[in-house]
Image (tube, helix red, strand yellow):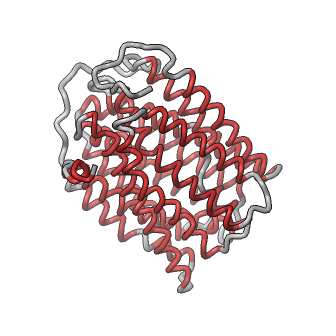
Amino acid sequence: MFKTLFSLPRTVWLIGLISFVNDAASDMLYPLMPLYLATVLMAGPKALGLIEGVAEASSSIFKLVSGVIVDRTKKTKPWIVIGYLLAGLGRPLVAIASSWTWVLCIRFADRLGKGLRTSPRDALLADTVPPNQRGLTFGLHRSMDNAGAVLGPLIAAFLLSIHIPLRDIFLWATIPGVITVGLALCLRESPRERVIVQPFSWSLEGLSPQFKRYILVAGIFALANSSDMFLLLRARELGVPQEQIPLLWAAISLITTVFGTPLSALSDRFSRKNFILIAWCAFAFFYIAMSFAGISLWMLFGLFAIYGLFKAATEGVEKALVADLAPRGMTGTAFGWFNLISGLMLLPASLIFGWLYESFNPSYAFLFSGSCAGFAFLLLAFWVFKSPETQNPRQLPHLG
């Protein structure tokens, strides 16, 4: 695996480096957001659910728009650069927000940037390598992305330990934002096949029945996967000290970084479907276990380790599966639809979770998510690949 890993094209490694720096900035702030909203702006779980849901759902719409445009223009770099530029400009503005509604607007701008860059970036990665290296490629990208998510919380924890105010920490995100945009400007376009592209259709015309069923099931699973900020809020309520919250988030990212690449690379040889099924089962167990009160800190840390392994086994593999199912010339559109459906469901997921969390009991919220994940598991296992439909030329035989 290591020989193949280090022989991957320059573009793959550069995109990984960009994601590393960007996520160092993003995840320096991410675990602090619920604390900032609760202690500085006096906003509760409902506001948190609305902010994260609206931000992620809005981002998803632009992931589809940018994906469709990429397939028609064959240009990915401009959208990647603009996307990182918007994110870099938006994050530091949280420091001057006077209410949670301003944070909502700023998070919208940040997620707009993510929406514009994600599908073009994924399409560029998929088109840069052959099909039998997609799992490894997306796994490496996610590992480097999560490596940044390890560094970011560590920086946040250090700044908190030396008593830097929460507002001031948001300003530090300016520096990695500038570096990210500079690296994005160094990207090179990958030659894309000149094929006739199907006109855009809201009925997903040109995409296979298996792909349509897969993104529907992915959307149901996304309904279970509300904002990770709720996990950090729950950890704080279960007894994790405030200064250790960023470290807990860093530990999750470290696990995902270490195991993301090898697990995704294994999916190039074995069934991507089975990898996702096992991971979804672990997710359901994690959320159901988090519904119980009185969890010891050691049990809590063990559960968060399971969550890190879930992320490692799905983040790269799910995207590799999308690329496998995408018809020629429609990679950007396929990623756009996948990101749209998965992201749009985050709005009701976060709103429902926040409502159950605050209005009733955190246990109900976690049980709801665990149940949705279990239902998605059954559909993927017995429905998505139920018939031996004709595979398109880019689809690998081990998908099911």
Residue 342 seen in the figure: yes
State the image quarter where residue 349 is shown.
top right
Please say if 130 is above or below 211.
below
* Drawn side of residue 315 relative to residue 296, left or right: left
- Quadrant, the C terminus: top left
Count the marks: 0
Front position in the image: 88 or 329: 329
* Drawn side of residue 144 relative to residue 1, left or right: right
Front position in the image: 67 or 289: 289
* Drawn side of residue 282 relative to residue 269, left or right: right
* Drawn side of residue 38 relative to residue 217, left or right: right
Front position in the image: 228 or 281: 281
Please say if 200 is above or below 137.
above
The percent coordinates of residue 262 (x first, y second) are 38, 50
The percent coordinates of residue 222 (x first, y second) are 57, 39
Please say if 363 is above or below 147.
above
In the image, what residue occupies the spot 55% across and 79% down?
160
Residue 89 seen in the figure: no
The percent coordinates of residue 24 (x first, y second) are 41, 65
In the image, what residue occupies the spot 71% across and 51% down?
289
State the image quarter where residue 68 is shown.
top left
The percent coordinates of residue 318 (x first, y second) are 44, 38
In the image, what residue occupies the spot 71% across and 53% down?
290
State the image quarter where residue 123 is shown.
top left
Which residue of the protein is positioned furthest toward the right in this rendering? Answer: 360
